[in-house]
């Protein structure tokens, strides 16, 4: 189910920004107490190693600025930099007095521009496929078609189409992708063969459960084409080398072990 993003409160002006932050060049330092989090706005589902990031910030300071909107009440709505903010909150809990370094959006910044700002990940943790899919879906909900979205994010229309298709998958499949058990592109290709979503979900879960490798499951593992290929290989070996056809199960077992 799509999350309903809370509306952005009334924006402040440059006077309010100057009264509530100190500025060096184009960057402002904002007390953490003045940062507010917009409900359901952050697409990140996995924040990653926040403790490691907080140690890095403590040693090297916050190198990359986040993005914020200044509000009428003098607070700043966080647009990009949720991991950095979480890391700074850890430092604050440990007795430090950190500031959030950010670029303040202009009063004419559009919701579309805010979404595009979230595509720029400056803290070395790229967005996952489910997170990208959510952002693309938001752009489409603003009225953009797939070609327009592709141009805005620097991707192909085919990529955008795949991500939109993936955005409609079940939470179970999205979690498996997030965990690295299957790739989003594989899910898209599985959908071409298995149209029914419930059946597709069960097939993917079954393939993941039976996967004995440390890699993401393949299309063949989900759709069963692997067994067909193994059977064909076994029959070819029987024909070429004159092996007894009754030994096909043994041959198939050997092939599986060596794939």
Image (cartoon, grey):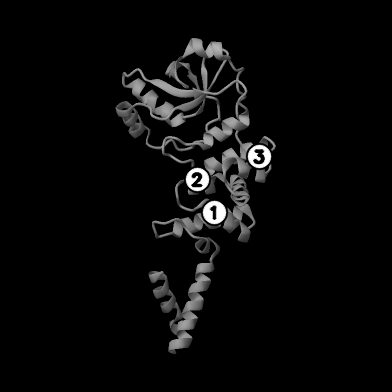
What residue appears at the point 62 percent right and 32 percent down from the top-left corner? Answer: 112
* Location of mark 1 (residue): 185
Which mark lies nearer to you, 2 or 1? 1
Q: Looking at the image, can residue 84 be seen?
A: yes
Mark 2: which secondary structure?
Answer: helix
Question: As drawn, which residue projects farthest toward the bottom?
Answer: 242
Instruction: Answer with mark 1 or mark 3, whichever residue precedes in sequence.
Output: 3
Dot label at residue 90: none
C-alpha span from label 2 to label 3? 23 Å
Question: What is the crowding at mark 3: few (fewer than 14 residues within 10 Å), some, or many (at least 20)?
Answer: some
Picture quadrant of residue 87: top left
- Residue 73 point in image, percent of width and height: 55, 12
Judging by the rendered image, the residue that carries numbered circle 2 is: 175
Query: Residue 16: x, y in percent?
Result: 54, 11
Tell me the quarter of the image containing the N terminus.
top right
Mark 2 Cα-neighbour bin, 10 Å: few <14, some 14–19, many ≥20: some
Q: Secondary structure at mark 3?
A: helix
Label 1 SS = helix
Tell which tag, 2 or 3, sits nearer the viewer. 3
55 horizontally vs 256: left or right: left
Residue at mark 3: 140
Whether tag 2 and tag 3 are in contact, CB under 8 A, the answer is: no
Question: Which numbered disc, 2 or 1, marks the residue that appears first in the sequence?
Answer: 2
Mark 1 crowd level (few <14, some 14–19, many ≥20, 10 Å Cα): some
Q: Residue furthest left?
A: 59
Residue 14 against residue 170 in the figure, above or below: above
Is the residue under label 1 in contact with that under label 2 (CB below 8 Å)?
Answer: no
Q: Earlier in the sequence, mark 2 or mark 3?
A: 3
């Amino acid at each position: 189910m799509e999350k309903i993003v809370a509306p952005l409160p009334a924006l402040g002006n440059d006077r309010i920004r100057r009264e509530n932050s100190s500025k060096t060049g184009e960057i402002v330092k904002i007390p953490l107490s003045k940062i507010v989090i917009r409900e359901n706005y952050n697409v990140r589902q996995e924040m990653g190693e926040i403790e490691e990031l907080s140690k890095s910030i403590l040693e090297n300071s916050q190198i990359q600025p986040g993005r914020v909107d200044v509000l009428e009440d003098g607070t700043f709505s966080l647009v990009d930099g949720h991991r950095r903010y979480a890391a700074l909150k850890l430092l604050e809990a440990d007795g430090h007095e950190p500031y959030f370094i950010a670029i303040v959006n202009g009063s004419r910044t559009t919701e579309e521009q805010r979404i595009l700002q979230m595509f720029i990940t400056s803290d070395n943790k790229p967005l996952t496929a489910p997170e990208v899919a959510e952002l693309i879906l938001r752009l489409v909900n603003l009225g953009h078609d797939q070609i327009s979205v592709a141009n805005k994010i620097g991707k192909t229309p085919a990529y955008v189409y795949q991500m939109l298709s993936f955005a409609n998958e079940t939470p179970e499949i999205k979690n498996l992708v997030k965990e690295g058990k299957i790739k989003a592109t594989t899910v898209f290709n599985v959908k071409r063969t298995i149209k029914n979503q419930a059946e597709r979900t069960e097939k993917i879960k079954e393939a993941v459960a039976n996967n004995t490798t440390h890699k993401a499951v393949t299309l063949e593992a989900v759709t069963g084409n692997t067994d067909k290929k193994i059977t064909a290989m076994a029959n070819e070996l029987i024909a070429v080398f004159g092996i007894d056809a009754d030994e096909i199960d043994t041959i198939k077992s050997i092939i599986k072990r060596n794939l």
